[in-house]
Amino acid sequence: MKRVTFFSLLLTCTIYLLAARQFPNPSDSASQPFDFESSLNSWVVAQSNPDAGALSVVAIGSGNSLHGLRIDANHAGWFGIDDANAQLPISIDAASEYIFDLSSTFNEGSFAVAFQIGSEYHWCQTSLFALPSNSHKTLKADLNTLLASEEACMGSVPEGASDVRGIWIYLGQEGVYLLDGVRAQKIDSAIK
């Protein structure tokens, strides 16, 4: 298996800064397994930090969705979903890239995305990214690259990784954040 360094991982995770806070076109090829149009879609505050904040669905009225997931973070913590939800697991063969559209209000912040992989729930996460106040960023996380990085996967790459069992977003500061859905798509990669 090809080893991927931390720095090449940074280059692979593509971040787009959207000056006009426009969300991506819904006609792209990605599916949206978590759209927050009518519910939280079983997203929760992680059990490891239950006082990290609160989640709610709010109207946003632009972009891909009419509604998004509002995260009121009391302090740094993890927010996400695990395979207790009917929409997980998702096969890596079916969706190997996940796209997160995240906005901040008021406070400058930082975020990372983590995945729990396979029946062993192997933890693999992106590096920490800055999120300036009153801004929007799109993060594309390529699982083919992420899962090949020992550094990203807590010192060892997951063996026999076939599906995503959990998706988590780390917010590094207190503040109000808006997640406009999570999209997933299959991409081809030279890393196998």
Image: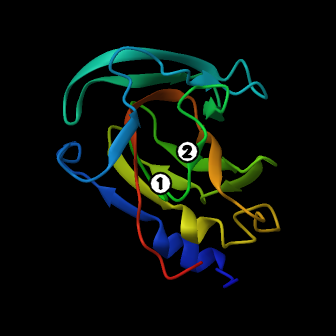
Where does the image place residue 110, in percent across and percent down from the top left?
Answer: 53, 46
**In this rendering, is residue 173 above or below 71?**
below
The numbered mark at residue 117 is: none
- Label 2: state its secondary structure: strand
Kindly identify the residue that appears in the image at 36 percent across and 51 percent down. Answer: 138
Kindly identify the residue that appears in the image at 21 percent across and 51 percent down. Answer: 19
**Do we see residue 76 in this rendering?**
no
Residue 107 located left or right of residue 163: left
- Quarter of the figure that contains the C terminus: bottom right
Where does the image place residue 166, in percent across and percent down from the top left?
Answer: 64, 40
Mark 2 touches mark 1? (CB < 8 Å)? yes
Q: How is the image coloured?
A: rainbow
Quickly name the residue at label 2.
Answer: 90
Residue type at mark 2: give it: Ile
Q: Nearer the viewer, residue 171 or 186?
A: 186
Residue type at mark 1: give it: Ala
* Residue 139 lies in quadrant: bottom left
**Do we see residue 45 in this rendering?**
yes
Residue 83 located left or right of residue 101: right
Q: Nearer the viewer, residue 40 or 173?
A: 40
The numbered mark at residue 94 is: 1
Q: Residues within 10 Å of mark 2 (few under 14, many from 20)?
A: many
Q: Residues within 10 Å of mark 1 (few under 14, many from 20)?
A: few
